[in-house]
Image (cartoon, rainbow, N blue to C red):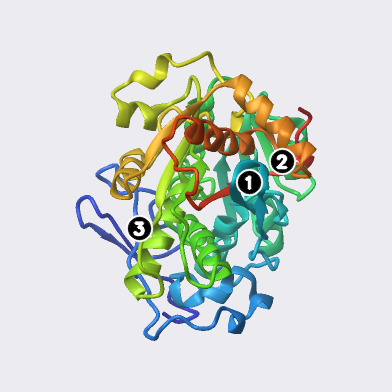
């Protein structure tokens, strides 16, 4: 891959191929999500983690990445710290430049856009992805328009607008926001920088797993417990851990536990046969994962099942209790970040995670953009 030849796209469902370019499709004509047509792997053994160039941020793992670094704010290498109160390790994904793990995907996505000569992008988001896309688009000198729910938190919309992006609020549920954005894409208004559909975003989120392994001297935990809406971090973690195993840098893939908010449980329903839907009232605190129909839902289910994992539903009260405990413990996160620690406690109490199991939990978004 050279600086003038970003990788083409391929559909895993029907094997159609599409040429890379600013007019490339955002999904296959069969309706399925596309993937980048290259899957790089390092040739040699795992290096001493101390030799990785952390000044390059997550791009220190460029041997694994199918996108060339063009747009960066030094993102990556978020701290991995002990959390004794939860018998886990927390990876502090909320310390990224825009305040969430979505910067992992945004740096790769906007790097690809810049390489294609894209001049304007659009995305739809409840907040964090939009803020990340806006910030990295500003860094790239690319115009951005973000479609958000009309009731999006003011702190998140302010972060978008202050980067010079246009914010278009949409009444209705989260699906209505996506529909409005897709309509703009199909009118030809801009390139779809979708954190749910665009494969470059998932290339970026694989680095979560690469960092976790490197920070642990190329070992992996027993389980990773993480919030799941569109599955951008879940699938990034799965792809990253699988890539490490295939490269021979680690010996296995950890169990992945997806945590969903009560009332919006498509992945838990798919795995548990619909029993989760009646578990509790809507957990409106965890607004960042209220996705009724994830674009890559079947892939999310496959990743969970392939690792012997499961999907867990967390209610509003458990989320609020975990949020308060996190903030008292020095972790100033947004409510959606609290569902995974809450799930760890519940799973340990029920014996579904052993007392001595080694667990990593990403804290995904900053509380500085939240008024809760």
Q: Helix or strand or loop: what does disc 3 sit on?
A: strand
Q: Residue 7 or 247: which is nearer the viewer?
A: 247
The residue that appears at 79% across and 30% down in the rendered structure is 371
Number of numbered callouts drawn: 3
Which tag, 3 or 2, sits closer to the chain's start? 3
Q: Which residue is mark 2?
A: 333
Please give the label number shown on residue 55.
none
In the image, taking residue 94 as reference, residue 52 lies left or right, namely left
The residue that appears at 55% across and 61% down in the rendered structure is 118
Residue 287 sits above or below residue 19 on the image: above
The residue mark sitting in front, 3 or 2, is 2
Q: Which residue is mark 1?
A: 363
Q: Helix or strand or loop: what does disc 2 sit on?
A: loop
The residue mark sitting in front, 3 or 1, is 1
Q: Which residue is mark 3?
A: 35
Spatial CA distance of label 3 from label 1 is 27 Å
The N terminus, quarter of image: bottom left
* Contact check, label 1 and label 2, Cβ < 8 Å: yes
Image coords of residue 281 (percent x, y): 53, 13
* Contact check, label 3 and label 2, Cβ < 8 Å: no
Spatial CA distance of label 1 from label 2 is 7 Å
Which tag, 1 or 2, sits closer to the chain's start? 2
Image coords of residue 14 (percent x, y): 19, 52
**Residue 116 seen anywhere in this rendered image of the structure:** yes
The residue that appears at 47% across and 78% down in the rendered structure is 4
Which tag, 3 or 1, sits closer to the chain's start? 3
Spatial CA distance of label 3 from label 2 is 32 Å
């Amino acid at each position: 891959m050279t600086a003038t030849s970003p990788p083409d796209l391929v559909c895993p469902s029907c094997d159609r191929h599409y040429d890379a370019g600013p007019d490339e499709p955002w999904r296959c004509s069969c309706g399925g999500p596309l993937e980048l047509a290259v899957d790089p792997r390092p040739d040699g053994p795992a290096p001493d983690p101390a030799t990785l160039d952390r000044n390059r941020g997550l791009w220190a793992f460029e041997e694994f990445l199918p996108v060339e670094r063009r747009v960066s704010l030094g993102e990556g290498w978020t701290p991995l710290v002990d959390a004794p109160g939860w018998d886990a390790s927390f990876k502090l994904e909320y310390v990224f430049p825009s305040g969430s793990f979505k910067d992992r995907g945004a740096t790769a996505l906007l790097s690809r856009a810049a390489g294609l000569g894209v001049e304007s992008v659009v995305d739809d988001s409840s907040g964090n992805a939009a803020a990340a896309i806006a910030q990295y688009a500003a860094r790239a000198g690319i115009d951005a328009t973000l479609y958000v729910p009309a009731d999006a938190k003011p702190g998140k919309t302010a972060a978008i607008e202050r980067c010079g992006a246009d914010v278009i609020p949409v009444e209705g549920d989260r699906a209505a926001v996506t529909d409005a954005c897709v309509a703009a894409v199909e009118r030809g208004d801009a390139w779809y920088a979708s954190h749910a559909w665009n494969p470059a975003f998932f290339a970026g989120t694989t680095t979560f797993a690469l960092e976790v392994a490197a920070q642990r001297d190329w070992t992996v935990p027993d389980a990773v417990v993480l919030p799941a809406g569109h599955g951008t971090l879940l699938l990034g973690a799965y792809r990253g851990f699988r890539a490490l195993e295939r490269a021979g840098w680690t010996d296995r893939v950890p169990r992945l536990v997806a945590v969903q908010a009560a009332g919006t449980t498509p992945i838990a329903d798919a795995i548990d046969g619909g029993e989760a839907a009646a578990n509790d009232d809507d957990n409106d605190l965890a607004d960042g994962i209220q996705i009724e129909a994830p674009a890559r839902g079947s892939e999310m289910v496959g990743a969970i099942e392939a690792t012997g994992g499961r999907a867990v539903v967390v209610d509003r009260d458990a989320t609020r209790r975990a949020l308060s405990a996190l903030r008292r413990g020095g972790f100033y996160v947004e409510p959606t970040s609290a569902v995974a620690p809450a799930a760890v406690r519940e799973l340990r109490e029920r014996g579904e995670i052993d007392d001595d199991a080694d667990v990593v939990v990403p804290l995904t978004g900053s509380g500085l953009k939240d008024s809760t």
